[in-house]
Image (cartoon, helix red, strand yellow):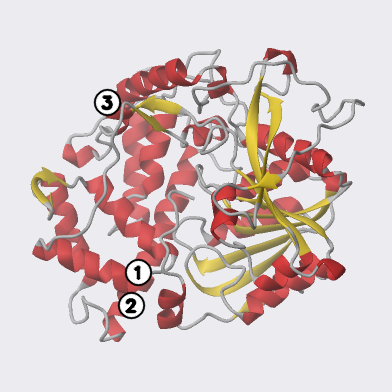
């Protein structure tokens, strides 16, 4: 089977309203004055200021129309000690930086005191012209589990139909939702803020926008923190294998906790066997939603909903869920409805060339994941990559090793046991940066900056006065019970 990609297209999409007026002065290489941000109190929270900034749909051809990127700001709570603006780059794809600021400071108060916190909804998501696709198609994800009858041909057919619906309902932005374009958007509102240099903090998938910014605008970086870092240098084989391995590692840590902690709902059980039995039922079509016995839970959904609580980590909640599935106990669920629905994962396809040549290659990748993850078998990344491999668009920002010159030293932070952005990604990205330093959090979960006093102190010292930790610095793990209770919110999948 040949690889199905049309040569003129790209991923992720725009909303129903595109502003097609010409853009003056937003090109970063232009000598024209930068547009100003018209800050107004946000309707949802007057303590936060909201604005929108026109940016080109295609930064290489700004005459082809513009979109509006939503931006929000919280002023430093101690203005006398204000350092400048700290740009918060949300994860996802699909995380909302505006929503995060509206809901709270989104960073520890020590940082909120000394920085104006500025964030945004990345192009193609949320308030920034979200990609819109056929809701019925999005609700019918293809089967990507070979032993359950899934084939690569099914993913190819699905990706073509979904991509066509996204393009029809979104418009030309579908070709320009990559992280390089997002980095250029960030620099546009840096200019609109009137700042020569900015500090940046990215988490998870947001670290890719940070890396792209440092590559293209190194002299405009004051400081850059990459928390739970995305490795953009990996081909499909290594990407999928490392994802499966890091998910399995976090699941193993969860199982060890259950073995030793009586508060675990599965204490006294073989947790790996419990999951294996659930997985086998899912493959046979015998695992059902406790709220709707007529609706089966497929194997990929089981894997994804097992990995997601490991972000916190919310080990107690995961144990409760797996036990409830085994016993078919009812759980609260919510379903989206409507003719159109957002599809932020198109951004991954814009940043990731998932070069899968056909069925045999796809099956070989599946088997490599199985060996790396004997219980989970795979990772939620498998479904996304299978779709991206046949997405009907080009890849504006394919994987590459970082090429950063002229930027200040960069701080990388990562947990030793991260279920989504594995520790080996952090070590690899740090090597590519050259003048980066990796802080290791010897614990679990996704997101490091405020795990404990040690991680917060390292990040604060770096952001306040550019003091980096010594290479090889580790911060101790917070006790699992403390981690579980302190981080109750489920992280948005995937990264």
Say if mark 3 contacts mark 1, CB within 8 Å: no
Q: Give the quadrant of residue 376.
A: bottom left
Where residue 252 is drawn, which disc sits there? 1
Front residue of 20 and 370: 20
Q: Is residue 277 above or below residue 56?
A: below
Q: Give the quadrant of residue 35.
A: top right
Instruction: Give how far across and how far down residue 107 sits, in percent.
Output: 63, 65
Front residue of 18 and 39: 39
Instruction: Give how far across and how far down residue 47 sits, in percent.
Output: 64, 58
The residue drawn where x is 32% and y is 44% is 367
State the SS at label 3.
Answer: helix
Query: Left or right: where does residue 72 sit relative to residue 220?
Result: left
Instruction: Give how far across and how far down residue 228 sits, in percent.
Output: 57, 59
Count residues near mark 1 (Cα–Cα under 10 Å), then give few for <14, some for 14-19, many for 20+: some
Which residue is identified by label 2?
256
Residue 405: in sight, yes or no?
Answer: no
Q: How far separated are the C-alphas under marks 3 and 1?
A: 32 Å
């Amino acid at each position: 089977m040949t690889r199905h990609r049309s040569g003129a297209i790209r991923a992720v999409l725009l909303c129903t309203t595109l502003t097609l007026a010409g853009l003056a002065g937003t090109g970063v290489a232009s000598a024209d004055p930068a547009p100003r941000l018209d800050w107004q109190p946000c309707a949802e929270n007057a303590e936060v200021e909201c604005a929108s900034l026109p940016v080109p749909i295609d930064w290489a051809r700004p005459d082809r129309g513009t979109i509006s990127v939503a931006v929000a700001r919280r002023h430093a709570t101690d203005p006398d000690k204000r350092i400048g603006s700290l740009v918060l780059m949300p994860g996802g794809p699909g995380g909302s930086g505006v929503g995060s600021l509206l809901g709270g400071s989104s960073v520890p108060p020590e940082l909120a005191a000394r920085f104006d916190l500025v964030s945004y909804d990345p192009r193609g998501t949320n308030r920034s012209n979200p990609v819109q696709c056929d809701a019925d198609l999005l609700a019918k994800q293809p089967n990507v589990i070979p032993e359950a009858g899934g084939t690569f041909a099914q993913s190819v057919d699905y990706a073509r139909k979904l991509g066509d619906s996204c393009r029809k309902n979104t418009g030309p932005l579908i070709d320009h939702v990559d992280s390089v374009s997002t980095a250029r958007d960030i620099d546009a509102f840096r200019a609109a803020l009137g700042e020569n240099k900015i500090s940046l903090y990215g988490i998870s998938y947001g670290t890719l926008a940070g890396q792209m910014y440092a590559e293209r605008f190194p002299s405009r970086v004051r400081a850059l923190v990459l928390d739970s870092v995305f490795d953009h240098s990996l081909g499909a084989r290594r990407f999928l294998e490392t994802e499966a391995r890091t998910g399995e590692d976090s699941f193993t840590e969860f199982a060890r906790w259950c073995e030793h902690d009586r508060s675990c709902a599965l204490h006294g059980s073989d947790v790996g066997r419990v999951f294996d039995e659930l997985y086998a039922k899912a493959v046979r079509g015998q695992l059902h939603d406790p709220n709707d016995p007529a609706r089966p839970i497929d194997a990929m959904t089981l894997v994804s909903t097992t990995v997601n609580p490991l972000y916190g980590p919310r080990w107690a909640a995961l144990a409760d869920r797996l036990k409830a599935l085994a016993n078919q106990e009812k759980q609260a669920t919510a379903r989206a409805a409507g003719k159109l629905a957002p599809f932020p994962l198109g951004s991954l396809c814009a940043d990731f060339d998932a070069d899968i040549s056909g069925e045999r290659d796809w099956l070989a990748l599946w088997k490599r994941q199985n060996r790396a993850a004997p219980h989970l078998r795979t990772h939620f990344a498998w479904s996304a990559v299978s779709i991206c491999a046949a997405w009907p668009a080009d890849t504006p920002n394919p994987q590459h090793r970082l090429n950063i010159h002229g930027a200040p030293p960069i701080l990388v932070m990562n947990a030793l046991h991260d279920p989504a952005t594995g520790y080996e990604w952090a070590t690899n990205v740090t090597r590519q940066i050259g003048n980066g330093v990796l802080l290791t959090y010897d614990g679990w979960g996704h997101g490091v900056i405020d795990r404990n006093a040690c991680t917060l102190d390292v990040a604060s010292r770096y952001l306040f006065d550019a003091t980096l930790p010594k290479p090889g610095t580790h911060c101790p793990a917070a006790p699992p019970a403390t981690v579980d209770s302190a981080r109750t919110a489920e992280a948005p999948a995937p990264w």
